[in-house]
Amino acid sequence: MNPFADTLQSLRDAFNSGRTRPAEFRAAQLEGLSRFLKENRDALLAALAQDLHKSPFESEISEISICQSEINMALNNLRSWMKDEHVSKNLATQLDKVFIRREPYGVVLIISPWNYPLNLILVPLVGAIAAGNCVVLKPSEMSKSVEKIISERLPCYLDKDCFSVVLGGPQETSSLLENKFDYIFFTGNPSVGRIIMAAASQYLTPITLELGGKNPCYVDDNCDPQNVANRVAFFRFFNAGQTCVAPDYLLCSQQMQEKLLPALQNAVTQFYGKDPQSSPDLGRIINDKHFQRLRGLLGSGQVAIGGQSDEEERYIAPTVLVDVKETDPVMQEEIFGPILPILNVQSIDEAITFIRKREKPLALYTFSNDSEVVHQMLEHTSSGGFCGNDGFMHMTLTTLPFGGVGNSGMGMYHGKFSFDTFSHQRACLLRSSGLEKLNSLRYPPYAQRSLGLLLSTVEISRRSQCTLL
Ligand code: NAD
């Protein structure tokens, strides 16, 4: 028997009892989440520091505050999100009630990674609760201190019959995935995404895949090198570069590279001091395996800034690499660490060709004083999100969908998009049981003259040709 079968059966029973559906229940769980964040704030900050050497500043803005905003947004809008959406009708349905009902899927699974271990489990959870689902949470086994708080303390703030935390790594998750879920929400790397998708296909379970990849950052000759360097360095070295939407590599001309290098060095020194290893604001690499992987990538091209590492602390200095070739190891995988390679291109057209040859990224960045250049990049490329003249500011807005495209994922969330992701949109039409005469046109024996009349009640006409309305 599958070790998770009993847990899932009791969640399914709870869902089938209908208790997660009322707005009051959903709001009470969201209030519980809010209390969890407030009452465990210090423990969470300590756990994030322990797992990733995350500074309280970074933890507040990228984990706790984002979760709190999502909770507040859901609480502020829950009742209006839950309302049936009435839609326009054709002539044949004028007397009917026609609407979209957003109903919960049922028992959903949320699997999360280690790099923002609180944010990436709680933000989807907010959407799943708001939409009225029961949930199994599978936090990352790598961010051990946060995993411990999620498994030991979070359940005290939620209805235990409806929400469950499951622990473990790939083996336990594989066994969990043998069970039928009504929705799976996965955040992680694209190769594990394929495993999740294959497991979901067994039951035709709908999924969201929030994946990663290499996010290009094009820097035009027409920009202020120091402004660009400050913004790129901040977003590349935030959380020691372990961010799915971080700029992964820079594309710029040789001339711009010469201006950017001193500016980047200046930004690194301003942010982290002369000895970044002693800065309280610079994170560490999550584990030895990732540390060794990143240390290997330091051998690509030439080190222009940084390059130092310390195995004992899993420290990698904020590093910039130049003379990097497309074929170098650093360009073959998502870097996911504090290393920024620069590759030279002669023009925006060459940058666009370079980007379009590769998988569609999760995020794409373009820096230029010329808005035409920013729009040209936006127009000729595709990515999950796009930001002109900054790093991942676009993902701080709950009014924008967050998600990938192609190899960087499918589906979206944040704010109302999370609620919609965890809801099935049910098409509903309610008709009177009387007025049968109106239906006679459609019944056999079919008459040619009825057809024209019938079609005029259901067919959509081109606006310019419409004579009916
Ligand atoms: P990962 O894919 O290794 O792990 C994610 C989760 O999947 C973990 O909970 C893990 O236990 C589970 N898992 C791992 N291997 C599995 C397997 N074989 N079978 C079943 N489950 C398995 O990812 P990670 O290393 O934790 O995180 C880094 C990746 O996540 C990067 O690629 C990054 O870009 C991506 N990411 C994406 C987003 C986003 O929002 N798109 C956010 C953060 C991270």
Image (cartoon, rainbow, N blue to C red):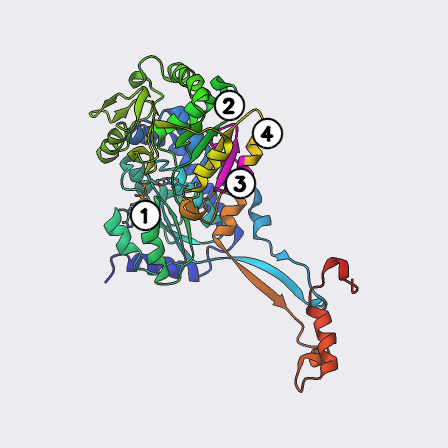
Q: Is residue 178 left or right of residue 362?
A: left
Residue 447 included in the magenta stretch of the image:
no
Task: Classify 10 Å Cα crowding around label 2: few (below 14), some (14-19), many (20 and above).
Answer: many
- Helix, strand or loop under label 1: helix
Of the image marks 1 and 4, the number of the one nearer the N terminus = 1
Of the image marks 4 and 2, the number of the one nearer the N terminus = 2
- Helix, strand or loop under label 3: helix
Q: Is residue 306 left or right of residue 425?
A: left
Q: Amino acid at mark 2?
A: Asp
Q: Amino acid at mark 1?
A: Ser
Of the image marks 1 and 2, the number of the one nearer the N terminus = 1
Image coordinates of residue 9 in percent, x first then y, are 34, 61
Q: Which residue was labeled with disc 2?
A: 221
| Mark-to-mark CA distance, 3 and 1 | 27 Å
| Mark-to-mark CA distance, 4 and 2 | 13 Å
Q: Which residue was labeled with disc 4?
A: 371
Figure quarter occupied by ligand 1: top left
Q: Which residue was labeled with disc 3?
A: 380
Image coordinates of residue 201 in percent, x first then y, are 36, 60
Task: Give the quadrant of the C terminus.
Answer: bottom right
The magenta span reads: 377-398
Q: Amino acid at mark 4?
A: Ser
